[in-house]
Amino acid sequence: MKPSLIRLLIIVAIMACAGAIFSSVMPDYLKNHISIDGDVRGALEVPRELPGFLLVFITGILVSMRRHNAFGGVFLIGIAAFIGLAFLVNTLPTFVIFMVLWSTATHAFMPLRDAVAIDLAGVDRRGWILGRIGAFRSGGLILGTGAVWILMEQLNADFRTIWIFAAGIMVLGAIFSFSLPERKEKKRSVDKKVKRFLYRKEYRLYYLLCMLFGARKQIFLTFAPWMLVSLFAQTAPDLALVMGISAILGLFVKPWFGNMIDRFGERTILMIDAVLIVVLCSGYAVVPNLFQPGIALLLLYSFFIMDELLFSLAMARTTYLSSIVHDKNDMIPTMGLGGTLDHAVSMIVPLIGGILWVTIAPWAVFAFAGLVAIASFFVVRRIPVKHGRGYQLVE
């Protein structure tokens, strides 16, 4: 691989490490340190997803920056977020401020990461490179969740120590980012100037896929770990351990997913994904009420791991977009608009989920997610059928 691609993969692993620390600690922190309930947990997704909703504007800024400055700026924002969590948070409102700051860093990183990866890897290896991106993310997740488990379970570290450790990880990421070489290309003419904001009707199926993924994603990101923490008294080290197991599996599964996308096409892979999500939703809904707590917890953790792995199939949306864009410079702004539409939905869905959680029961949240997965299946059928390197529209 190119040295610049290797450096990008290292940056991906570092960001994933910090993200794993935040994700595995946050449910425990909110439940046992700030003491919130399920409805508040759902409402917190509105400010947390706000940077994703604004992603069309964030990517508008990113496309005008040099590659290493864009990555470096993202890591500097992340450093500020973890320092704030360590030293300035003592109430829910202050937590929200730095949660949003961290969310800004992670949401800005994702389209930048995928667009640069595809650019470096070339047209014929889209799935291949995103599969390797997924594997290095899994490596970072292993490091992050392992650090949480060792620090909190074995060394009895407090939350402040965890946040400081995460800030240190982000410093390392910033160092690698600012040393990333800039892409060499001919000076663009006026008519080839990169667009900061872009909408094309030809990409409307991609936009719709983003919206449906936003609903599916947010239900599981919010309420699957919340079920484990609130109904089964799981803690940050417990979540970190199971996320680490998922990450270890991801080292092997995610590259395989990428290869399968290249081989069978996005349509087939995303249809299979939708079917599996329906199965997972059914499991989350019925298992807590059908089995003894020990067996139920084992099954729910199995679902959690499977769901974590299936999230990586979102790379199929990116490879689909990269195959239909008119110009490679459309990638980042189009992913930015897709991210905004994704998060417009994912800001609303947790509010609905929180209401269902407290007014009906947890199972109702996952029944709702199952309906979203069924809708996704029929939308995915509209993705063009792949024939070699070309595509034939499905009527």
Image (cartoon, rainbow, N blue to C red):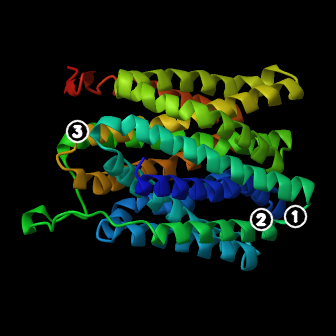
Residue at mark 3: 324
Q: How far apart are marks 1 and 3 (CA)?
A: 49 Å
Residue 246 picture location, percent across and down: 68, 37
Residue 144 in the image: above or below residue 99: above
**Residue labelled with disc 1:** 157
Residue depicted at x 80% and y 60%:
35
Left or right: 293 as drawn, with respect to 125: right
Residue at the spot of label 2: 162
Element on which disc 3 rests:
helix
Note whether 260 is above or below 319 in the view shown.
above
Mark 1 residue type = Ala
Under circle 2, the secondary element is: helix
N-term mark: 3 or 2 = 2
Q: Earlier in the sequence, mark 1 or mark 2?
A: 1
> Gap between marks 3 and 2, in whole Å?
43 Å
Q: Nearer the viewer, residue 255 or 54?
A: 255
Q: Is the residue under label 2 in contact with that under label 3 (CB below 8 Å)?
A: no
Above or below 181: residue 324: above
